[in-house]
Amino acid sequence: MERIHQQHYFLDSVQSNRISTMSSSLMQGPEFQHILRILNTNVEGKRNVVFALTKINGLGRRFTDLICKKAEIDVNKRAGELTADEIEKVVAVIQNPRQFKIPLWFLNRQKDYKTGKYSQIFAQSIAAKLRDDIERMKKIRAHRGLRHWWGIRVRGQHTCSTGRRKH
Amino acid sequence: MDAEKVAELRKKRQFKKFTFRGIELEQLLDLTNDELMDLVTARARRRMSRGLKRKPMALIKRLRQAKKEAPPGEKPRGIKTHLRNMVIVPEMIGSIIGIYNGKMFCGVEMKPEMIGMYLGEFAITYKPVRHGRPGVSAAHQTRFIPL
């Protein structure tokens, strides 16, 4: 349904001879950014907002959809058309999800081991948190940590005949 | 050494404060079972809610005993156990437990980072594989060995 709607849109603006008041056909306009930089990641401007934001580590389709709704951004826009204000709003929502009423079960770092907080981690912090978790297990010599250390399967898989093409 | 000096020394030695889900060590030791259940993982919570008829009562009693008997500033003596399926609670921190791995008792000191895990995770039950030259059975061609 949505796709048909958008086609209509496009035809309409073409037919109206470039005298378009619709911002959606401002594709190559002066304010359109081809690559944005949000939260230390490059975000493609050409894509739809929701999907462009997924390029940020830690945000998937469902989460960005929710973010855009909470930040009141038109989901039919392309990412390059976002104004600086709107980008700031988005970043604010990502960094304080609870303030914007995003439910706790939606977040990717729940009941954090050290701090007990619920948060959404994104971009570089994901790699850092992962490393922290693994280091913790290695330090206490837990079985899982040992297996990480040895570079073999951790989650109980059979290793007799699989996993041979070790990176 | 009096108890005060020992306690002070210990605090000075700790360079990084340990927090378990936002709660510090001293408070952890005072938690009731129910409060602890809220903090641990789902698996541990289930175990605690199911098995609190206290099968491992004996182990905890002996741990407390050993801690009391230990001279201040030294580690308590090791307690041996077969209970690999025991969840580690804050009470056990600082004790030395000899965890059975089928063959012998591996002495492990309980650290605060271990809370919520099982005892068995710290006593590995197998010798890690070091592959050597493959034996006779491995090579497909030489399946038939003439006498």
Image (cartoon, coloured by chain):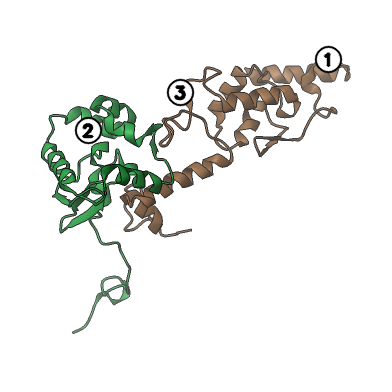
Chain colours: A brown, B green
Nearest the eye: A59 or B117:
B117
**Between marks 2 and 1 in the image, the one whose residue lies nearer the viewer:** 2
Of the two numbered discs 3 and 1 on the same chain, state the one appearing first in sequence.
1
Q: CA distance from mark 3 to mark 1?
A: 40 Å
Separation of marks 2 and 3 at Cα, in angstroms? 24 Å
In what element is the residue under mark 3?
A: helix
The quarter holding residue B26 reads: top left
Q: Residues within 10 Å of mark 3 (few under 14, many from 20)?
A: some
Residue indicated by mark 3: A104
Per the image, the residue denoted by label 2 is B47
Amino acid at pointer 3: Leu
Q: Are marks 2 and 1 on the same chain?
A: no
Labels 2, 3: one chain: no
| In front of the other: B105 or B139 | B105
Q: Residue B107 in the image: x percent, y percent?
A: 22, 55
Residue farthest to the bottom, as pictured: B147
Label 1 sits on a secondary structure element that is loop
Q: Position of residue A41 (x, y in %)?
A: 66, 39
Residue ID for mark 1: A21
In the drawing, what numbered circle is on residue A50? Answer: none
Q: What percent of the width, then of the height, locates residue A114?
A: 42, 37
**Does the CB distance between marks 2 and 1 fall below 8 Å?**
no
Quadrant of res B105: bottom left
Dot 1 amino acid type: Thr
Tell me, yes or no, if residue A32 can be seen here.
Answer: yes
Q: Can you tell which of label 3 and label 1 is closer to the viewer?
A: 3
The image shows residue B20 at horizontal and vertical percentages of 37, 35
